[in-house]
């Protein structure tokens, strides 16, 4: 497996190339938390990014997934933040009402109407072999297959 800096750089490059492929129909939005995350969302849907959900047909680059938020940010304790089906589920909260630790995984994910992220590029967990692998894809093909 590549080192952390290389994995982040590869995912950022993929994300930026995907943004070019999606063109004017999508907009890039940086995380409000000033963290490693960024979103590509259909134009005009940026206000849907919240602790309660993300826009349909949106993409997210991040180094953290699958956690429970502090109830001050999301009152619904059942919502898994940035739930990603291709990595292990969330850890337990450190105590009632407090956040859990996220899963630190470098990936670009796609969120459709099911409100679940699915990997399109980066680290994924193979549940059958119980091992981490790297998912490679072409941004042009992903833009054609998913976004349009």
Image (cartoon, rainbow, N blue to C red):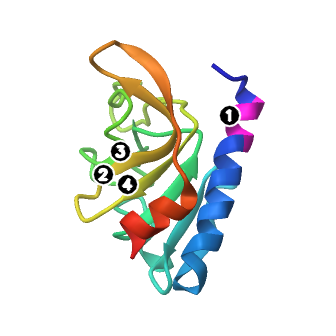
Query: Contact (CB < 8 A) between labels 1 and 4?
Result: no
Is 146 one of the magenta-colored residues?
Answer: no
Tags 1 and 2 touching, CB below 8 Å: no
Q: Position of residue 145 (x, y in %)?
A: 38, 64
Residue on which the image places disc 4: 74
Where residue 134 sits: x, y (%)? 52, 30
Foreground of the two, 117 or 122? 122
Answer above or below: position of 73 versus 131: below
Helix, strand or loop at disc 3? loop
**Circle 2: element type:** loop
Q: Earlier in the sequence, mark 3 or mark 4?
A: 4
First reached walking from the N terminus: tag 1 or tag 4 = 1
Residue 7 marker: 1
Look at discs 1 and 4 and give the one toward the viewer. Answer: 1
Residue at the spot 33% in from the left edge and 32% down from the top edge? 96
Q: Disc 1 and disc 4: Cα gap in Å? A: 30 Å
| Picture layout, residue 35 above or below residue 147 | above
Please tell me how crowded label 3 is: few (under 14), some (14-19), or many (20+) other residues with Cα within 10 Å: many
Helix, strand or loop at label 4? It is loop
Q: Is residue 136 visible?
A: yes
Of circles 3 and 1, which is in front?
1
Question: How far, Cα to Cα, is label 3 from label 1?
Answer: 20 Å
What is the span of residues highlighted in magenta in the rendered image? 5-9
Determine whether the residue tagged by mark 1 lies in a helix, strand or loop.
helix
């Amino acid at each position: 497996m590549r080192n952390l800096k290389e994995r982040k750089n590869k995912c950022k490059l993929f994300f930026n190339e995907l943004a070019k492929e999606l063109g004017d129909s999508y907009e890039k939005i940086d995380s409000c938390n000033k963290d490693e995350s960024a979103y590509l969302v259909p134009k005009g849907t940026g206000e849907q990014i919240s602790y309660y959900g993300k826009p349909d047909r949106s993409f997210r680059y991040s180094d953290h997934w699958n956690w429970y938020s502090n109830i001050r940010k999301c009152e619904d304790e059942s919502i898994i933040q940035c739930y990603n089906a291709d990595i292990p589920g969330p850890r337990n909260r450190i105590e009632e009402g407090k956040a859990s630790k996220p899963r630190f995984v470098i990936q670009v994910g796609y969120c459709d109407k099911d409100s679940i992220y699915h990997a399109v590029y980066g680290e994924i967990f193979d549940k059958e072999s119980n091992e981490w692998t790297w998912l490679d894809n072409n941004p042009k093909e992903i833009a054609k297959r998913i976004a349009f």
